[in-house]
Image (cartoon, rainbow, N blue to C red):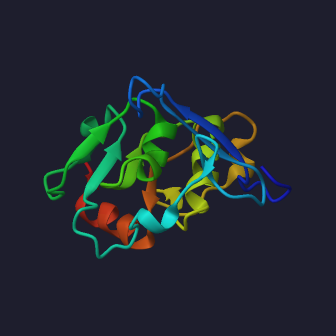
Amino acid sequence: LNSSFEPVGAIVYAPRWGTESDGGNLLTLLPGGNIKLNGKDLDITSMDIAEQSVKRNQLMIGSRLHNYFDFSLFNSKLRVSGSAIINIVGTLLHRDVKGSLITPCYIWDIAAGHALIKGVGLNLEYYSTGKIDYKALADRSMAPDHFVSGTQKTLELIRNKIKLK
C-alpha cells in the first residue's frame, strides 16, 4: 500500500492455474512497473477485456455465495476457486472470466489482486457501497461488505443481475 492506502504492488502465485508441467502461474507487479506473468510482461492486448466480447461471460465467485445471493438472473457460467485473491485475478489468468463476486474478507486477501487488476484498467469495489477504504481495513478488520471486480460495466451487470437474498 502507498501512503494513500492504495495497493500498488503484488505477488500472487496461482499453483492450479497452469499445466502440471509448468507448475502454475506467478503474477508480479512492482510499484510503477508492468504486470509480469511468470517473469514476462503480461500481454494485455491479447486479453480482450472490452465488454463487447461475448466470449468473456464467466464470473469467479466465492464458494458460499449461493447462500447469500440469488444468481437466477445471471445466465453465464460461475467459477469457484476457493481463494479470494485467485477469484479477483481470474480475469488475468483465464480469458473467459469477466469479473468476480467474493465474500467479505481481509486486506491481505484483496490488496495484491486489486493492484494487479488496476494495472489493466479493472476495478475492485464493495458490492453495496463502492470504493474500498483500505485505511479502515489496515487494522486487520474484516471488510464490511462483499466485493465485486471487473470493468465498470461488469460491476453494474453484477449488481443488477445478482441480488442479495
The location of residue 47, given as percent across then percent down, is: 42, 62
Total marks shown come to: 0
Front-most of residues 83 and 146: 83
Q: Residue at x 28, y 66 (%)?
A: 160
Q: Is residue 146 visible?
A: no
Residue 125 left/right relative to 18: right
**Residue under the point 57% across and 42% down:** 143
Where residue 52 appears, x then y in whole percent?
29, 76
Residue at image location 18% in from the left, 55% down from the top: 76
Q: Residue at x 75, y 50 (%)?
A: 30
**In the shown orientation, is residue 75 left or right of residue 66?**
left
Q: Which quadrant of the structure image shows residue 11?
A: top right
Q: Position of residue 40 (x, y in %)?
A: 61, 49
Is residue 125 something that shows in the picture?
A: yes
Q: Is residue 160 above or below residue 66?
A: below
Extreme residue toward the bottom, this view:
52
- Toward the viewer: 85 or 143? 85
Question: From the viewer's perspective, is residue 84 above or below residue 36?
Answer: above
- Residue 96 pos. (x, y %): 30, 54
Q: Residue furthest front?
A: 21
Looking at the image, residue 105 sits to the left or right of residue 75; the answer is: right
Is the residue 67 above or below the residue 56 in the image? above
**In front: 55, or 128?**
55
